[in-house]
């Protein structure tokens, strides 16, 4: 009995220490980025920095609105494609496909997670960009970036959603079938709502991956500092702007790039907060009904 108590307390202590370390590291990164970016924002002006449409370091113009719009459009575009496809694939693996098919597909999904982003960028550059060019424009566009990013986000959405569906007690589905539901009705009306928390977690992690992706975006989006007007327009993302210019930046230019990193932190925080709020509101609504 004493041994179990010691093991339990030790495990709890280790978990608390690890969680605390992660928060400290995150706080240190944010503090360093904020400290380096603050002088530039003070010199440029917060409104000019956030809502300026010109990014020309040689002329001391540092407006990140075009990159912010580009990042958001690519993120939402990729997630709009990845969410339905990812959930459908997860349902296939967890509830529909026979074991032999699942045994072949699941390892393929897991392999996709480990592929370097530059490989996705190369495939997008050689395959997707020419196909988009046939539709219109140069091919380097929001659409091409969204398609590449969708492929990168899909493994995360599929894996976590599948695990969430498998974690739902079998009694839920059996009860629905016993009440006369079809197989699809049991999945749609019972399994998916029961796995809502895990599905939202998959979407949040997918959005985090989408917002933070750099190399593949640099290769297929065109890197033009303009506000995109259509899916075929070129653009530049916040992460791509940092990666392209940080090596030669100095002074206010360098500080503005660090401030861009702070904006990325805040965007991810807002997206996560909105997703968590929507989840809690959905849970309350279903509980009332």
Image (cartoon, rainbow, N blue to C red):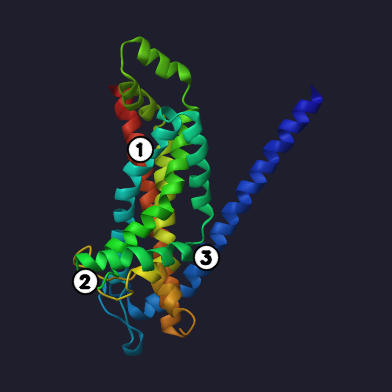
Tell me what residue is drawn at x 39 percent, y 59 percent: 211
Image position, residue 69 (x, y; %)? 28, 65
Instruction: Choose between 167 and 289: the one closer to the eye.
Output: 167
Give residue 217's quadrant in the image: bottom left
Image position, residue 241 (x, y; %)? 39, 74
Give residue 281's quadrant in the image: top left
Residues at badges 3 and 2 in contact (C-beta under 8 Å)? no
As helix, strand or loop, the secondary structure at mark 1 comes to helix
The residue at which mark 3 appears reads as 31
- 234 w.r.t. 182: above or below: below
Name the mark on residue 137: 2
The disc, 3 or 2, on the residue closer to the chain's N-terminal end is 3
Instruction: Choose between 254 and 99: the one closer to the eye.
Output: 99
Q: Hey, which residue is sitting farthest bottom in the picture?
A: 58
Instruction: Work out how far the residue at label 3 is from the one at label 2, CA to CA, in angstroms.
Output: 41 Å
The residue at which mark 1 appears reads as 88
Image position, residue 201 (x, y; %)? 43, 42
Instruction: Work out how far the residue at label 1 is from the one at label 2, CA to CA, in angstroms.
Output: 32 Å
For the question of whether residue 50 can be seen, the reply is: no
């Amino acid at each position: 009995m004493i041994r179990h108590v010691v093991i339990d307390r030790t495990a709890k202590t280790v978990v608390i220490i690890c969680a605390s370390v992660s928060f400290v590291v995150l706080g240190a990164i944010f503090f360093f980025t904020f400290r380096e970016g603050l002088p530039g924002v003070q010199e440029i002006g917060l409104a000019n920095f956030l809502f300026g449409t010109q990014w020309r370091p040689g002329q001391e113009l540092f407006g990140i609105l075009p990159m912010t719009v580009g990042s958001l459009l690519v993120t939402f575009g990729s997630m709009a494609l990845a969410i339905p496809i990812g959930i459908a694939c997860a349902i296939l693996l967890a509830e529909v496909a026979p074991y032999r098919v699942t045994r072949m597909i699941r390892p393929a999904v897991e392999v996709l997670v480990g592929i370097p982003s530059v490989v996705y960028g190369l495939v997008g550059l050689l395959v997707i960009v020419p196909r988009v060019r046939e539709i219109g424009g140069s091919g380097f566009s929001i659409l091409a970036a969204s398609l590449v990013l969708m492929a990168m986000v899909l493994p995360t959405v599929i894996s976590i959603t599948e695990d969430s569906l498998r974690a739902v007690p079998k009694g839920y589905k059996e009860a629905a079938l016993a009440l006369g539901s079809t197989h699809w009705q049991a999945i749609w009306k019972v399994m998916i709502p029961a796995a809502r928390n895990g599905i939202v977690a998959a979407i949040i992690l997918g959005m985090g991956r989408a917002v933070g992706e750099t190399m593949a975006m640099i290769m297929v989006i065109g890197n033009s500092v303009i506000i995109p007007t259509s899916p075929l327009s070129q653009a530049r993302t916040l992460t791509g702007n940092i990666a392209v210019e940080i090596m030669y930046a100095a002074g206010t230019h360098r500080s503005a790039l660090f401030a861009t990193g702070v904006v990325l932190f805040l965007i991810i925080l807002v997206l996560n907060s909105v997703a968590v709020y929507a989840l809690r509101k959905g849970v309350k609504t279903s509980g009332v009904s």
